[in-house]
Image (spheres, rainbow, N blue to C red):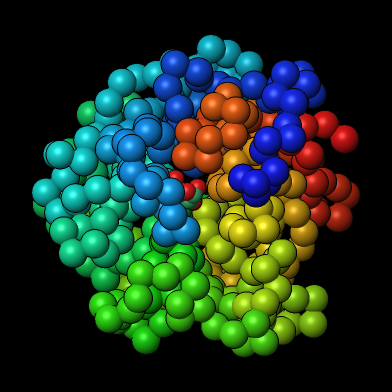
Amino acid sequence: MPEDSIDHIDFEHLNKVALSQPLVSHIYTADPSAHVFNGKIYIYPSHDIDAGEAFDDLGSHFAMEDYHVISMEGVDSEAIDNGVALHVDDVPWAERQMWAPDAAYKNGKYYLYFPAKDYNGVFRIGVAVADSPVGPFKAQPNAIKNSFSIDPAVFEDEDGSYYMYFGGLWGGQLQRWRTGHFNPDFPESPTAHIPNDEEPALLPFVAKLTDNMLEFAEKPKEIEIVDEKGNLLLSGDNERRFFEAAWMHKYNGKYYFSYSTGDTHFICYAIGDNPYGPFTYSGRILNPVVGWTSHHSICEVNGKWYLFYHDSSLSKGVTHLRSIKVAQINYRADSTIETLNPYGA
Ligand code: FUB
């Protein structure tokens, strides 16, 4: 929901009809990546703060500094804040903007994947390791080699392979990597170097991870999102094309790649037959929430599927002060997902 419409919102009414209330309200949290580890839910969100940065279309006001892990016994249980799990000051290569993270478990260790700007102002993706799902996490000295842009989401396939999906337009800098190298001469404009409306849209990336979970095992590959005729979605198709907030889950043997459409504020999904795609656009999971950004994860808990998402209703529409929420999702008989309205029908 664009920010210019928030003046007209009756927040008291909106909170009454909302699908979900904030899981925690003593801090602002966003971009929830949820996993079940050892039978318990662990949520890896961004920790929103007001750092006093001016608003712009590159997201400079999203000036987050650390991560807190939130844990829950079940979706209806109290959400526990486990304190600071990693701070930017403890990441040697990172200077600022700790944006949407994700986590994975393998062989007794927990891995926190996170984007941050390096000392050259370029978004990279780093990894930090812990013995516990709630940290504290120890960052690797360098960002993952050949990583770029934002919003890592790590998916474990049934054969034990792990894949990282990532990318984000505008402030997420994906458009500055069109040639395969970061374009340093670029004007700091969010839309510069975005393809024209009739050209194929920019695509997110995927890379398999190495056995030790610390590096890419391959050069990141673009993943194709196509329409029902098999044609790549176009750049001007901004109600369907990828913008940011990649997530992958598997349902009934199919791979569901879900994402935010950014400036049109939908969470959408596309279905494929393998982790690399192509993925066919299949619909919307979540209609626009209060606040500019929309970001989610999808997680199975005790045989039911849940959407973890955020909105800015607690802060009465302040777009960089968000709160994580959860709602059940339902699959139709044909394996498509019913669209959720965040504030009732
Ligand atoms: O939280 C900062 C950024 O906002 C995330 O990286 C994007 O996905 C959007 O939610």
Residue 18 drawn above or below residue 45: above
Q: Residue furthest top?
A: 78
Residue 187 position in % (x across, y down): 35, 76
Residue 272 sits in which quadrant?
bottom right
Closest to the observer: 80 or 254? 80
- Give percent across and percent down for residue 110: 31, 38
In the rendered picture of this protein, how many numbered marks are placed on residues? 0
Image vertical order of residue 30 relative to residue 41, above or below: below
The answer to whether residue 60 is left or right of residue 243 is: left
From this view, report whether residue 300 is shown above or below residue 57. above
Q: Is residue 173 left or right of residue 31?
A: left
Residue at 59% across / 72% down in the picture? 277
> In the rendering, at what x and y percent does residue 112 appear?
32, 42
Q: Residue at x 59, y 85 (%)?
A: 196
| Image point (15%, 54%), residue name | 93
Image quadrant holding the C terminus, namely top right
Snapshot quadrant of residue 23: top right
Q: Is residue 152 visible?
A: no
Is residue 2 visible in the rendered image? The answer is yes
In the picture, measured across the screen, residue 333 lies left or right of residue 15, that is right
Picture residue at 72% right of the left edge, 64% below the top: 239
Tell me if 30 is positioned left or right of 81 in this view: right
Q: Residue 309, position in %: x, y?
A: 59, 38
| Pick the front one: 226 or 16 | 16
